[in-house]
């Protein structure tokens, strides 16, 4: 094999030669498409610190792929332009995931999000880590068709929507238990009549205790 050394331009015959191509300037081909096709691996190797693969359209820099502190980085260069992941679902194109750069990287999944299970010594879950506010702080919001109907926040607050009820329920025949400090405080039992068990007494503040007709209170 022999090398091909090119100073300022390249022709099609040289580009298909069997060997190494050394280009001192810009590799440019004015045809419709340019194809890089190799029987082995195609390698892009930039030796400068922070070497970047720039993606351009008509000279406009719209995306970059680069290495920083041994991390693999993908960057949308245009202001407020998203990174979107597309796929093929049974022959139909879908938008699997959108990262909204105008919303600090807000992630919108097209459908479900699955989180793997942990082990006996490893906890796996969803972590909400945000700045505290006067009302909620980091919170989990429940929505249907873009309309919120419930919130769970780090203030221990569970709030329903303005026009819809917010239900907390078990999917099977199990008790529903509320507690704090790893201790059971209130239990709604899965029995006929759904008995409510309060661990340390019941205190009513500015409210009434209503007992349905035909029922009573045991002391």
Image: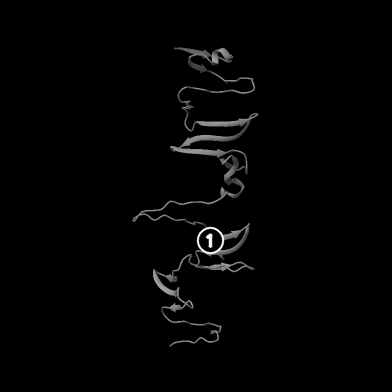
Query: Which residue lies at the image location 47% right of the left edge and 35% below the top edge?
Result: 67
Density class for disc 1 (Cα within 10 Å; few <14, some 14-19, many ≥20) is some
Instruction: Please state the horizontal and vertical placement of residue 33, each as a whole percent of the image.
Output: 61, 23
Which residue is disc 1 drawn over?
139
* As drawn, 94 above or below 23: below
Query: Which residue lies at the image location 56% right of the left edge and 31% below the top edge?
Result: 54
* As drawn, 214 above or below 102: below
Instruction: Please state the horizontal and vertical placement of residue 131, each as a whole percent of the image.
Output: 52, 58
Instruction: Please state the horizontal and vertical placement of residue 51, each as a whole percent of the image.
Output: 49, 31
1 sits to left or right of 120 = right
Q: Quadrant of residue 184?
A: bottom left
* As drawn, 14 above or below 163: above
Q: Quadrant of residue 191?
A: bottom left
Query: Which residue lies at the image location 50% right of the left edge and 17% below the top edge?
Result: 22
The color scheme shown is: one colour
| Towards the viewer: 131 or 141 | 141
| Towards the viewer: 190 or 49 | 190
| Image quarter (top left, top right, bottom left or bottom right) of the N terminus | top left
13 sits to left or right of 177 = right
Query: Which residue lies at the image location 54% right of the left edge and 13% below the top edge?
Result: 14
119 sits to left or right of 91 = left
Instruction: Please state the horizontal and vertical placement of residue 23, each as a whole percent of the image.
Output: 53, 18
Secondary structure type for disc 1: strand
| Image quarter (top left, top right, bottom left or bottom right) of the C terminus | bottom left
* As drawn, 189 above or below 12: below
């Amino acid at each position: 094999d022999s090398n091909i050394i090119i100073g300022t331009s390249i022709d099609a015959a040289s580009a298909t030669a069997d060997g190494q191509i050394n280009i001192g300037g810009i590799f440019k081909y004015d045809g419709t498409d340019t194809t890089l096709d190799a029987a082995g691996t195609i390698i892009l190797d930039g030796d400068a610190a922070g070497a970047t693969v720039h993606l351009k359209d008509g000279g406009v820099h719209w995306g970059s792929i680069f290495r920083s502190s041994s991390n693999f980085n993908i960057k949308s260069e245009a202001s407020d332009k998203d990174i979107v992941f597309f796929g093929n679902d049974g022959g139909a194109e879908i938008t699997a995931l959108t990262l909204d750069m105008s919303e600090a990287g807000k992630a919108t999944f097209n459908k479900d999000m699955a989180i793997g299970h942990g082990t006996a010594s490893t906890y796996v879950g969803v972590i909400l880590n945000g700045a505290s506010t006067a009302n909620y702080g980091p919170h989990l919001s429940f929505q249907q068709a873009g309309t919120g109907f419930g919130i769970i926040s780090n203030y221990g607050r569970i709030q329903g929507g303005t026009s819809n009820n917010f239900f907390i329920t078990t999917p099977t025949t199990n008790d529903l238990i509320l507690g704090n400090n790893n201790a059971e405080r209130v239990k709604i039992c899965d029995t006929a009549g759904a008995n409510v068990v309060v661990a340390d007494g019941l205190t009513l503040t500015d409210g009434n205790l209503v007992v349905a007709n035909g029922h009573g209170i045991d002391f």
